[in-house]
Amino acid sequence: DAMVIQNPRYQVTQFGKPVTLSCSQTLNHNVMYWYQQKSSQAPKLLFHYYDKDFNNEADTPDNFQSRRPNTSFCFLDIRSPGLGDAAMYLCATSRDKTILDTQYFGPGTRLTVL
Amino acid sequence: RKEVEQDPGPFNVPEGATVAFNCTYSNSASQSFFWYRQDCRKEPKLLMSVYSSGNEDGRFTAQLNRASQYISLLIRDSKLSDSATYLCVVDSNSNSGYALNFGKGTSLLVTP
């Protein structure tokens, strides 16, 4: 059974056209993360939610926003995608914040910017 | 200095060989260490956690050297299915307490 689901798996957008990526989880985990992974690079944490508490990484561009309307869902909004934003976007969850527990990753959304 | 550094490889080894990967990390306050495996164009998946005393899971052995801030992964009797990128992951022990820092990964190709 899928535990962390990302939709769509592939997303094509135009330069400057807003795009939203979706993540849902069936694990009832408190923490949800968004990572950006470019080709041959390490996954880079953009931000995370502990429950409703939003934590932005210092070097995440303002162009990237996130929403978590409930425990199960988390969205990544890219307000004005640039060519440099083409990447795999990975959603992950973990049970709690006090234990750096296993992070479970979704299959990712591969974003292409034309 | 990057927080987590790995030799990117690729490591090309024949089936049945033993191969070792190394990783260094910069934050001496880090407490949690992991090896993740990532197949081409797929998501990372946890391979194993790394404990201070070292730990083994089947053909895989992980070691941690806190003094040298060094982590290793040993794969014995390599299988074709072991071909993947192996990511060294270390907690950032930042104020937020949640973040994991990923290395760029070491690429392994096991050949027949």
Image: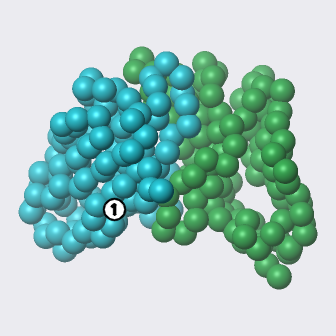
Chain colours: A cyan, B green
Specify whether residue A46 is in view: no
* Residue receiving disc 1: A109
Left or right relative to B88: residue B21: right
- Secondary structure under tag 1 reads strand
Instruction: Out of A6 and B86, give the one closest to the viewer.
Output: A6
Dot 1 crowding, Cα within 10 Å, few <14, some 14–19, many 20+: many
The answer for which chain carries disc 1 is: A
Residue A61 percent across, percent down from the top left:
23, 42
Residue under the point 29% across and 34% down: A71
Specify whether residue A14 is in view: yes
Residue under the point 43% across and 60% down: A107
Instruction: Out of A31 and B108, give the one closest to the viewer.
Output: A31
Question: Residue A58: which quarter of the image?
Answer: top left
The answer to whether residue B22 is above or below residue A80 is above
Question: Residue A83: which quarter of the image?
Answer: bottom left
Left or right relative to A46: residue B80: right
Question: Residue A11: which quarter of the image?
Answer: bottom left
